[in-house]
Image (cartoon, rainbow, N blue to C red):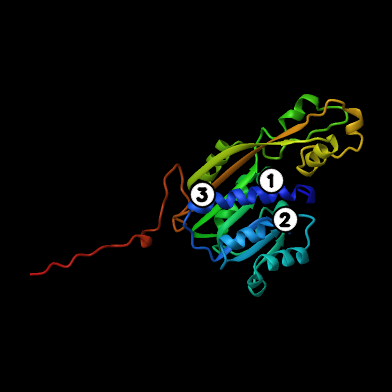
Amino acid sequence: MTQSIRWLQDEIADRMLQKLDIVKLNVRDILVVPDYPADHHAAVARRFPDARIHSVIEDGSSRLQLWIAKARANWRSIFRRSKTSALAHLHTSNKFDIPDNSVDLVFSNLLLHDLADPKLFLQECWRVLREGGLVVFSYLGPDTGKELRAIQGGALKLKNLRSPWDMHDLGDALVSKRFSDPVMDMEYLTLDYEQPQLLLGDVEALNLANANPHVEAEISDLPQKLTLEIVYGHAWALGKHLAKSQDSVAYIDVNQIGRKTRTDSH
């Protein structure tokens, strides 16, 4: 994503937080991935005023920009020690640079479609979440940019989403990574454009096509709208004391089983 699409990131972040209104969650630490210097910090700080926000910084953002954004959103955040790492590190290692069982909420906005394997991301979320923690995410679904497919070729070189998973695919992936009670839903957003260069700017910012300054001149029938399929989901990290399940059966150590005793009175 680039600066030109910040409004979309903030809008989707607001919608994600609205969906959390019905969720009861005691949050001490949040991991925001990707994090970027925009208005979403104020919304997150209002929703979780006492939480520390750990950041995986979006490519192209600076730590200073992010620090200023956090301070503006909630000045108390500048006195809280939090962890900061780069999104590039996640792309290369599939790892978050934070310890096991260290956050109560992973908040991931418009990222999963850009990952080579979202299952590895979910695996990392499971690792860093505390017992009873929540992962909440949004991403672009496979119908995104469907208007462009009819005119692709020549000057317009479309790029496939790295992970064009629909909400059923992600729901299955959550279950396979041991998350509980996954909830998935989806909506379509339609963006209308008066000028083709504005559409092409968003197409590039959304990473749907390679940049080409000659596209507008070479293609006369560019659409005046762009469809975004936004997929939302959340799931709980429960039963982390259980050993990894096999064949849909979870195994636990015998020492983890409590024994109830009864004292008979005479």
Instruction: Kindly report the distance in space between the C-alpha atoms of the residues bearing marks 1 and 2.
Output: 11 Å
- In the picture, the quarter occupied by the C terminus is bottom left
Query: Of the residues under marks 3 and 1, which one precedes in the sequence?
Result: 1
Amino acid beneath label 1: Leu
Amino acid beneath label 2: Leu
Q: Who is closer to the viewer here, 189 or 122?
A: 189
Q: Is 10 rendered above or below residue 260?
A: above
Left or right of 194, for residue 235: left
Q: Which mark is residue 155?
A: none
Q: Which mark is residue 235?
A: 3
Query: Of the residues under marks 1 and 2, which one precedes in the sequence?
Result: 2
Instruction: State the image coordinates of residue 94 (x, y, percent, origin top left).
Output: 67, 53
Q: Who is closer to the viewer here, 264 or 62?
A: 62
Mark 2 surroundings within 10 Å by alpha-carbon count, few (fewer than 14), some (14 through 19), many (20 or more): many
Instruction: Kindly report the distance in space between the C-alpha atoms of the residues bearing marks 3 and 1.
Output: 19 Å
Name the secondary structure under disc 2: helix
**Which residue is depicted at the point 89% across and 37% down?**
212
Q: Residue 87 carries which label?
A: 2
Mark 3 surroundings within 10 Å by alpha-carbon count, few (fewer than 14), some (14 through 19), many (20 or more): many
Residue receiving disc 1:
115
Instruction: Kindly report the distance in space between the C-alpha atoms of the residues bearing marks 2 and 3.
Output: 22 Å
Instruction: State the image coordinates of residue 154 (x, y, percent, origin top left).
Output: 87, 27
